[in-house]
Image: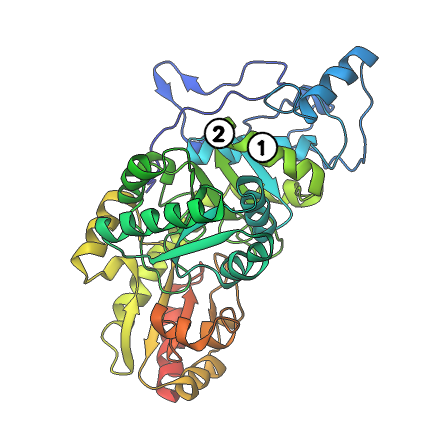
Amino acid sequence: MSTTPPVTPPTPRRKPKPEITRIGDRQLKPATLMMGFGYDPTLSEGALKPPIFLTSTFAFPSAEEGKRFFEGITGQRPGGSEGLVYSRFNGPNQEILEDRLAVWDGAEDALVFSSGMSAIATLLLACCGQGDVIVHSGPLYAATEGFIARTLSRFGIGYVDFPAGAAPAEISAALEKGKALAAQQGGKLALVYLESPANPTNALVDVEAVAAARDAIAPEAPIAIDNTFLGPLWQRPLDHGADVVVYSLTKYAGGHSDLVAGGLSGARRWMDPIRMLRNTMGTICDPNTSWMLLRSLETLELRMTRAGENAAKVCAFLAGHPKVEGLGYLGMIADPRQQDIYARHCSGAGSTFSLFITGSEAESFRFLDTLKIAKLAVSLGGTETLASHPASMTHLSVPPERKAALGITDNLVRISVGIEDPDDLIADFAQALDAA
């Protein structure tokens, strides 16, 4: 059953014929638009699906148009180039993918990158300068947190953090602290960066409360949110006050564990400066990966729906198991504050969750080593079920005291449920828990 409301698609750039986005009064939904939005077969010898455009450069129709295209690329005119220039800047596969990603988020524009971290790094560098401050929720993906704390700090960019489940007063206090720190450093509060659900605890951030605090304290600072765990099917942060949505497209959007990519969606006022820096840094997604993502977006709703249904069945079994100490699953939230956020922000519980096994690292490792169907691997959102140990793998670089404060314990196992038969998955988890 579809959980996505109809959306108004972005106005596609440089398309020679009008896009079909409505039938009568009915606005077509993203799952329908994924089959053709942004692509005209008549431009590619009638090919039903977009070819892979393996070229480094593009021929200009005229010198005057070449000049105009470069005016867009270099920022002398807003909105990017009106034509294809060079594959470090744009390309047909990338632009079709960006149009379709924007459809899912109800965004005006989108950008795609060579990885989730290249998207995040380009975003952070585009928004922040010397003396500026980032206020962020915690935990974040370890590489994101490390980039903010260790790399950006080398350039005089500070940060203030608050826990994912923070109440409005605590969020406001963090923004006030960030604004004061920025004033001391001669900068500004440049960005509010969120991750919700948080990796790997699944803790939710109250985006609406963050937006209200931002509007009151630092109205010029954009709010960016990593929506990888639930997006784009089960959460639409732009509807709740976020300005930029961040993705590791490697995960659910790609969905087959066979590519690495990242994406950003939002209004053009935020996308344009990020696009300019992407043009300079060359962090754009390549044509082949973009083509693979176009394929994957066609089945996104089917895959995520099946994975979500499987996760609900698996977690119903795990919740009653004597060797399970707890579950960080959004379909079984006990905390009233978290349940309130979930009810307002989310349309589904997702298929990635944290499993707390009775014991510590040794028991977690025995569980992981005994799995037969689920694969012991990092990442999430693929067609196959994956299991990993964040404390010793994805978040190994996080200092012990920070891990303890964030609830990343030695008995936490992160599970990403795939689209296998759910009863087979339950049997696999049962035998692995017996070994633990």
- The mark found on residue 33 in the picture is 2
Question: Could you tell me residue 278's position as x and y percent?
Answer: 65, 39
Q: Does the rendering let one see residue 62?
A: no
Identified by mark 1, the residue type is Pro
Secondary structure of residue under mark 1: helix
Direction left: furthest residue: 336
The quadrant the N terminus occupies is: top left
Relative side of 96 to 393, left or right: right
Q: Which of 113 and 433 is in front in this view?
A: 113
Q: Earlier in the sequence, mark 2 or mark 1?
A: 2
Residue 276, horizontal then vertical, whole percent: 64, 33
Residue 273: image tag: 1
C-alpha span from label 2 to label 1: 28 Å
Query: For the residue marked with disc 2, what is the amino acid?
Result: Leu
Image quadrant in which you'd find residue 8? top left
Of badges 2 and 1, the one in the foreground is: 1
Given residues 364 and 313, the one toward you in this image is: 364
Residue 135 disc label: none
Residue 167 locus on image (x, y percent):
23, 53
Badge 1: few (under 14), some or many (20 or more) residues near its Cα, within 10 Å?
some
In this view, 358 is above or below 41: below
Q: Which residue is drawn at 26% across and 43% down?
A: 209
Residue found at x 49% / y 36%: 265
Task: Examine the image and state in which quarter residue 243 appears.
Answer: top left
